[in-house]
């Protein structure tokens, strides 16, 4: 029996039993904006259902348990046979199964599929980000497979299935399949052309035997993998199944699982190929061309994943401050805390608005939209993922000491927050990719300028930022050394233009003042005090 000194007061209730989708105004408005009227009602219904699932006490507990019980590698069975299996907590399988059934691998073949999936991915990331990796890899494998129509016809129905089948068995016997990826080698890192894994042609046309080592293999429990290796004709993309059609295990030796900073519920492995059977995707020597569509899709998922983490961090911070009292009133009503929360909310809304705009470009599929993606995806990947970590740390600080305690959930968000900036090409890789698009693809810059130009004349700070950007773009001498700065400005101007067009005036005003007009400091909570910050914070409050 607790004594009188153990009476608990002035604590916020848990943020639970709510619609994660419906409580996010920036996200719901983006879905309404980008989905065609004929699929809008269906899309909203699906997303609200997933949002209620994500906000339920049971599913949130699954996220905690999956994170607290990381995967375990079993290289051999009890008799000494090599099996190379990864055991996961049941909660991991429940989360992954829910993600598959919610269509997080099924964007490519339905109307508005990318916007619907993007919103769902952003919602589901807020439960536990670790299961996003196999969902992302499976989704992103489709454009790579489509470079080989025969392989696509065989595998795409399995990848886009809404059935999760965790069993390791021949893919032809499964109603659904998951894909992983093995590109990175220890001597090359992001330089995939330094790949040393060897591919030796076999007698059957299009089949090879692989020998080599992959330093990072994502989602090693998957049914198949996209792998780069050196064939006689150069760097080539391959499909490596875990189980062959005759039921035997392919030579896929998991040497160890990585002990990571965050993303602990997900397995990332180091693997060896020793006589491993593989099928070629596309032509020999065209490996990079085969995977380029996959890379773009996974980079957009990094933006979405970071936007989801940012949204959850802001939701938790605003929720806490709406209940917590200090110095004679609610924290949310204190001018300085309101400034911090509003600044965090701006960052979150800008990330969500940009991510959904890029997803809509995928659904459109037109030439100009494809050109926009070429420059906007790496710019967004660079900037949004970079902003995730400082936002998560500041949001945790809003909870004070409570935010440093594991049970609050904030430490998990903080540990996860740097991940998307590192994966699928770190910051320098994204900035250099932006430079390549600027130099080689005039249509990409033209599409970008047309997009931001739609907001011209609506805000003088945005107009000035566009003008300054054009000046910077006119002088590309020695540009590599300032590529990060240029990429940051491209992302900020694009975010500002979207918020000016679509967000409430108080949100757009605050963003343009602080991010484009220079009227804000380096830390969060330094917005001009004359702005309508109370409205910005109220908009971010997770009340559905």
Image (cartoon, helix red, strand yellow):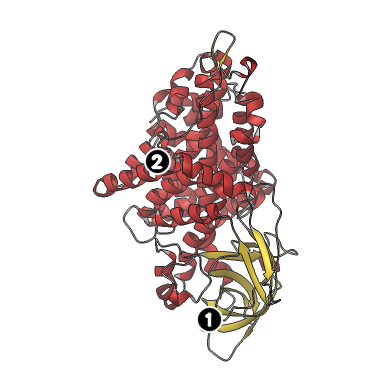
Is 87 or 416 nearer to us in this picture?
Answer: 87
User: Residue at coordinates 62% horizontally, 15% vertically from top-left?
Assistant: 4
**Residue 52 image label:** 2
Residue 214's disc number: none
Q: Is residue 532 visible?
A: no
Q: How many marks?
A: 2
Query: How far is disc 2 from disc 1 in space, using C-alphas?
Result: 40 Å
Percent position of residue 352, x then y: 47, 39
Label 2: how many residues lie within 10 Å, few (<14), some (14-19) or many (20+)?
Answer: many
- Picture quadrant where residue 252 is located: bottom right
Give the left or right position of residue 446, taking residue 381 as reference. Answer: left
Q: Can residue 499 be seen from the camera position used here?
A: yes
Q: Is residue 213 left or right of residue 250?
A: right
Q: Residue at x 58, y 20 (%)?
A: 8
**Which residue appears farthest toward the bottom when viewing the image?**
203
Q: Residue furthest front?
A: 1
Q: For the point 51% across and 51% down, which residue is it?
A: 301
Q: Is residue 16 above or below residue 107?
A: above
Q: Quadrant of the C terminus?
A: top left
Element assignment for label 2:
helix
Of the residues under marks 2 and 1, which one precedes in the sequence?
Answer: 2
Point 64% across, 78% down: residue: 251
- When asked about the image quadrant of residue 73, the answer is bottom right
Q: Quadrant of the N terminus?
A: top right
Question: Is residue 287 positioned above or below 461 on the image?
Answer: below
Quickly name the residue at label 1. Answer: 247
Q: Position of residue 65 (x, y in %)?
A: 58, 47
Residue sticking out furthest to the top: 328
Tell me the SS state at disc 1.
loop
Classed neighbour count for the residue bearing mark 1: other residues with Cα under 10 Å, few (<14), some (14–19), many (≥20): few
Q: Position of residue 237 (x, y in %)?
A: 57, 72
Circles 2 and 1: CB distance less than 8 Å? no
């Amino acid at each position: 029996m607790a004594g009188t000194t153990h009476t608990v007061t002035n604590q916020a209730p848990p943020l639970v039993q709510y619609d994660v989708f419906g409580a996010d105004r920036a996200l719901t408005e983006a879905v309404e904006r980008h989905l065609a009227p004929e699929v809008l009602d269906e899309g909203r219904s699906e997303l609200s259902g997933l949002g209620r699932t994500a906000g339920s006490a049971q599913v949130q507990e699954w996220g905690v348990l999956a994170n607290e019980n990381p995967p375990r590698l079993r290289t051999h069975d009890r008799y000494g046979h090599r099996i190379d299996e990864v055991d996961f907590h049941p909660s991991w399988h429940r989360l992954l199964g829910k993600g598959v059934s919610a269509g997080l691998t099924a964007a490519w073949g339905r109307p508005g599929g990318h916007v619907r999936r993007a919103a769902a991915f952003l919602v589901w990331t807020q439960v536990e980000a670790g299961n996003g990796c196999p969902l992302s890899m499976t989704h992103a494998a489709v454009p790579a497979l489509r470079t080989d129509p025969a392989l696509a016809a065989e595998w795409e129905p399995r990848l886009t299935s809404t059935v999760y089948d965790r069993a390791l068995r021949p893919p032809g016997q499964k109603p659904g399949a998951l894909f992983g990826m093995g590109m990175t080698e220890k001597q090359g890192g992001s330089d995939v052309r330094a790949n040393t894994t060897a591919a030796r042609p076999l007698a059957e046309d299009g089949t090879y035997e692989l020998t080599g080592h992959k330093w990072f293999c994502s989602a090693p429990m998957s049914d198949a993998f996209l792998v780069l290796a050196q064939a006689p004709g150069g760097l080539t993309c391959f499909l490596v199944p875990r189980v062959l059609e005759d039921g035997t295990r392919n030579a896929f030796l998991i040497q160890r699982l990585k002990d990571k900073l965050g993303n602990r519920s997900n397995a990332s492995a180091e693997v060896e190929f020793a006589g491993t059977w593989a099928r070629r995707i596309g032509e020999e020597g065209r490996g990079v061309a085969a995977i380029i569509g996959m890379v773009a899709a996974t980079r957009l998922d990094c933006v979405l994943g970071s936007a989801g983490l940012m949204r959850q961090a802001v939701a938790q911070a605003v929720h806490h401050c709406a209940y917590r009292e200090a110095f004679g009133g609610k924290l949310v009503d204190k001018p300085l805390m309101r400034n911090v929360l509003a600044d965090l909310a701006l960052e979150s809304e800008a990330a969500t608005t940009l991510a959904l705009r890029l997803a809509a470009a995928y659904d459109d599929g037109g030439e100009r939209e494809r050109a926009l993606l070429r420059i906007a995806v790496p710019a967004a990947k660079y900037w949004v993922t970079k902003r995730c970590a400082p936002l998560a740390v500041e949001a945790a600080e809003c909870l004070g000491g409570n935010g440093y305690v594991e049970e609050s959930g904030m430490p998990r968000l903080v540990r996860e927050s740097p991940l998307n900036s590192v994966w699928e090409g770190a910051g320098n890789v994204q900035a250099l990719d932006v430079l390549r698009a600027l130099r080689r693809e005039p249509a990409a810059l033209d599409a970008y300028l047309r997009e931001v130009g739609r907001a011209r004349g609506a805000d003088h700070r945005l107009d000035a930022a566009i003008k300054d950007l054009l000046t910077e773009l006119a002088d590309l001498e020695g540009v590599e050394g300032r590529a990060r700065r240029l990429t940051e400005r491209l992302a900020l101007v694009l975010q500002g233009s979207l918020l000016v067009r679509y967000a409430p005036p108080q949100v757009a005003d605050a963003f343009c003042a602080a991010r484009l007009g220079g009227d804000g400091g380096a830390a969060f909570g330094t917005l001009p005090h004359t702005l309508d910050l109370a409205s910005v914070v109220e908009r971010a409050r997770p009340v559905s």
